[in-house]
Image (cartoon, rainbow, N blue to C red):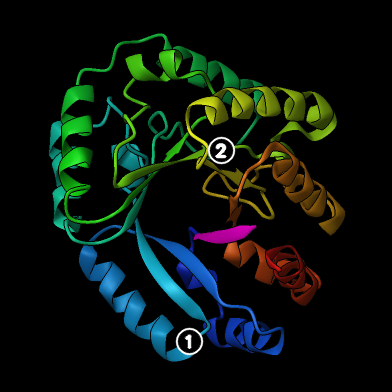
Amino acid sequence: MEFIFWCEFPKQVDWKKLQKILKDINLKLTVYIAVHSPKDFINWKKKIKKETPNIKNLYAWPVLKLKDGYWFSGFTSKENITKLQNFKGLNIKLDLEPPFPGKGYHNLKIALYILKWITRKAPNTKLLIKTVQDLSHYSHVLVNELPLPEFILKRSGLHIPKSRNISKNIMTYSSFGEHLRYLLKICLKFVLKQRLRKDKNISCSLGIAGPGIFGNEPFYKSLKEFKKDIQDAKKLGIKRCAVYSIESFLNRRNPNAWFSAVKEFSQ
């Protein structure tokens, strides 16, 4: 099993502490870091290369300002979609989600919010697809999509066709289910099976291990839950998992144990 990590809040990371943990267990990582511009990415890369050499690959995760929607989709303005062209030549991860609804997470609220957007036809889908495909001529693009059938995502500009330098990752965050976690996992498993039939190299996101951009998302209560998700992904034939997130691992009571679990399943 191969692992990659998301890093949404690089300012929250103690990069020297992370290096000590990774060095102690002999673990090297690939990380996608949230940035607003190539300049942000270059600055972070210099710092991380110096303080955390056990991060062997550091890639960019372009995000927008919250007022502009934060994530990308066919509903993103043309002006903000074209900002992606600035990342030409850099390997990136692109989150395809409806525009950010505001702080405060609630499962029902978010479900209704997503339903509202996926029933609309996005005006800038063609521009988004063309922009991402153009970027893929110069570097690799990892597209992060919602765990829904492709025909639903296409209408809202939440799906990019796969090509040689474009690979797919599906968000399968089981912690969002809370008391309905078992039911959610059944649904996520069904979606992954459908996607795997078309793309054997598809990866999936595991988590979450700590709060994200909403500030109050449900997250893993124990390391056992994380390990079980890895095992379930492995049984499905998933060869690569993305983990949310590196700063969340560091904020757990015993971060060494969480990173050691990644080391265990990497072997």
In this picture, is 163 found above or below 31? Answer: above
Q: Which residue is drawn at 34% across and 77% down?
A: 45
- Dominant SS of magenta comes to strand
Picture residue at 65% right of the left edge, 42% below the top: 217
CA separation in Å, label 1 and label 2: 28 Å
Residue bearing the label numbered 1: 53
Instruction: Describe residue 4's horizontal placement relative to residue 158 as left or right.
Output: right
Asked which secondary structure carries label 2, the reply is strand
Q: Is residue 234 left or right of residue 12?
A: right
Badge 2: residue crowd in 10 Å (few <14, some 14–19, many ≥20): many
Horizontal side of residue 95 vs 38, given as left or right: right
Q: Number of labelled discs?
A: 2
> What amino acid is at disc 1?
Pro
Q: Where is residue 87 in the image (x, y as percent from the top left)?
A: 20, 57
Is 35 or 266 nearer to us in this picture? 266
Residue interval drawn in magenta: 1-6
Query: Would residue 139 be found to the left or right of residue 218 on screen?
Result: left
Q: Give 122 or 216, whichever is nearer the viewer.
A: 122
Q: Out of 217 and 238, give the one closest to the viewer.
A: 238
Q: Mark 2 points at which residue?
A: 171
The type of residue carrying mark 2 is Met
